[in-house]
Amino acid sequence: MFAFIISRILQALPVMLVVALISFAMFAYVGDPVSIMLGQDYTEAQRAALVAELGLDQPFFVQFARFVGNALQGEFGLSYRLSRPVAQLIAERAPATLELAFCAAALALLVGVPMGVYTGLYRNAWLSRFFLTFSLIGVSLPTFLIGILLILVFSVWLGWLPSFGRGDVVDLGWWSTGLLTWSGIKALILPSITLGLFQLTLIMRLVRAEMLEVLRTDYIKFARARGLPNRAVHFGHALKNTLVPVITIAGLQLGGIIAFAIVTETVFQWPGMGLLFIQSVGAADIPVMAAYLLLIALVFVTINLIVDLLYYAVDPRIRSGFGAARGGH
Amino acid sequence: MMPALLEVEDLRVEFPTRRGLLTALDGISFAIDPGEVLGVVGESGAGKSMTGAAIIGLLEPPGRIAAGQVRLAGRRIDTLPYEEMRKIRGREIGAIFQDPLTTLNPLYRIGDQLIETMQTHLGVNAAEARRRAIEWLELVGIPAAAQRVDSYPHEFSGGMRQRVVIALALCAEPKLIVADEPTTALDVSIQAQVITLLKRLAREKGTAMMLVTHDMGVIAEAADRVAVMYAGRIAEIGPVREVVRHPKHPYSVGLMASIPPLDRRVERLAQIEGAMPRLSAIPPGCPFNPRCPYAFGRCRTERPELLETGATRAACWLYDAASERHVAGARAHG
Ligand SMILES: Nc1ncnc2c1ncn2[C@@H]1O[C@H](COP(=O)(O)OP(=O)(O)OP(=O)(O)O)[C@@H](O)[C@H]1O
Ligand code: SF4
Ligand SMILES: [Mg+2]
């Protein structure tokens, strides 16, 4: 188990290094940080001093190593736009995005999986047909349009739910949450649906396809031939076998949810990292963009690791396969 | 005389398809006595697996029983609601499938698969079920059963997995086993062992068996009686010695001739020409008539029912008193 984790972390390292390199290249070669920071009026001496201070006169590898070293300590310098430490900006915005992503993912899984199981088991029921038609909407409408439609219906026409912002948040010191106030929870509903709908329909269709596939297998027929109750056959034998592909896709989608919260956050003026990123792009605020890029890569790599661990937990064939590889057979 | 354990009467299975109604089984009738082994042979597509599936109530939709009856110990079971039939599956009728590599759930420990089966049907507690699971694994010849009970299927060889499948089919002590080609997917070298095991356990437990196979060696070794199927019908049925050594139906004659002689010389006929008809193109009259060397007028219009031939019963007009003339001719050949 421990060796398994280590090997997966080692595999993730090159990915992180490549992303760091891209991030760094943005830093070093997109725009000219020195002129941005100095403004219009400066002397050559001031400029040289700043270049030396930023280490821009050093060789490439030294600069890169310093960048990585700083990044590891959460040190990304000052935002050009807001003149505040990037790490601090991101730490302020992260709870909003993570809470939104968590709610969207929970919605996608808790609704998508049961819907997938249902449509897989009762292929011809009218409810299944309805779910499938409905899922086409989730797949085909762009996110911003879904968001705008939801706002139109639930905020403008019905006036039930807020159309922007997080509502009241409770500050827990290191984390600010909207889950503890009624207005915070209400504010989460529309953005969560907007962000999670695509994933929900995707997971539903995936679970359905996997269920149909698994229900045709011999071991399911044999489970029926042994007289096991439907509950055990469907939710034990069948569902468990659909889990491996579902975990993969759901994991990747969770990464996607965090990365693509940008659109939803823009539509709902949600004060998260995605909105911060969009504002930074507008202002060519390179340090924030670079840090965001690295952070998203880290999220993907972490989720991948968790997905691998879940595989390991679910499928005994992977466990023994790895055991054999480690034993050098 | 004991009453039959399983009675299949005039069973007809149909598949509605886009191109029309297909009749996969037509007028199948046979019985199996307690403890008896009925072998079922026939070309691929003859309907052997379909017969087994109809008996255990697991025909794949849209396939359905359109006519006839299936009775277990006198009780009609083909019309039971799903939940009633489920309680019979595993408990009264066990099933063994062809490919042990795909029959066991890869994500469940074999012990747990045994335990859930016994807990479902026998109402035993977990500890008792586990004790019995180990006992069953020993019984089917898994070495170090007490350790292997916690293994996953992929940790076993094909032959060992089929032994596990046998244990699973027998563990709730059913009175009848439907074994659909239980050795076909196995290595030739272990086929005999598995058949011997199955036969021994069935005898010890007094379990009757419907044994579907392509292997006439298996039939000769394990079966008491044998049914020869052709195009969804029974062509001939009778005691194994008679059907193998003195087949009466021209199709059985061809089938037995295409295998090497067993302990006694059988006269060899040429391989049967042609192929079995598709379900959508079964000829009227005797379904075998386009391939039959003895076919005569009546065969092309009237369908033969099973007729007494002496030791066996065969669906062939040669054995009808009304066609005595032809019988004389054919018997001269046979
Ligand atoms: N879903 C289906 N729809 C229509 N016809 C089917 C379907 N499933 C099977 N059949 C047909 O039913 C017939 C009987 O098939 P069955 O599987 O019982 O044959 P079998 O005797 O077991 O053959 P094998 O020796 O290859 O296992 C075949 O002609 C097959 O093509
Ligand atoms: S009934 Fe006729 S065609 Fe059919 S097997 Fe007998 S002789 Fe041949
Ligand atoms: Mg078959």
Image (cartoon, coloured by chain):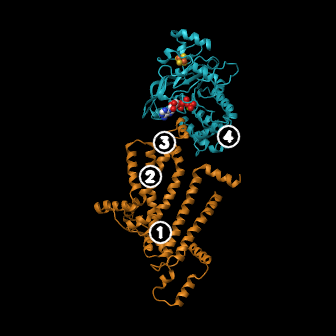
Chain colours: A orange, B cyan
**Chain holding disc 3:** A
**Residue receiving disc 1:** A94
Q: Indicate the position of residue A54 as horizontal and vertical percent values.
A: 56, 82
**Residue receiving disc 3:** A231
Q: For this rendering, which residue is in front, A229 or A59?
A: A59
Q: Quadrant of the N terminus of chain B?
A: top right
Say whether residue A194 is left or right of residue A33: left
Label 3 and label 1: CA atoms lie apart by 41 Å
Q: Quadrant of the C terminus of chain B?
A: top right
Q: Indicate the position of residue B152 as horizontal and vertical percent values.
A: 62, 45
1 and 2 marks on the same chain: yes
Q: Indicate the position of residue B153 as horizontal and vertical percent values.
A: 62, 43
3 and 1 marks on the same chain: yes
Label 2 residue SS:
helix
**Residue receiving disc 4:** B145
Label 1 residue SS:
helix
**Residue receiving disc 2:** A112
Q: Earlier in the sequence, mark 3 or mark 1?
A: 1
**Chain holding disc 1:** A
In this orientation, does residue B221 appear?
Answer: yes
Label 3 residue SS:
helix
Which residue is at a point 58% across and 68% down the rendered structure image?
A18
Q: Residues within 10 Å of mark 2 (few under 14, many from 20)?
A: many
Whether tag 2 and tag 4 are in contact, CB under 8 A, the answer is no
For badge 3, the amino acid type reads Arg
Q: State yes or no: Cβ of the residue under disc 3 lies below 8 Å from any atom of ligand 1.
A: no
For badge 1, the amino acid type reads Ala
For badge 4, the amino acid type reads Ala
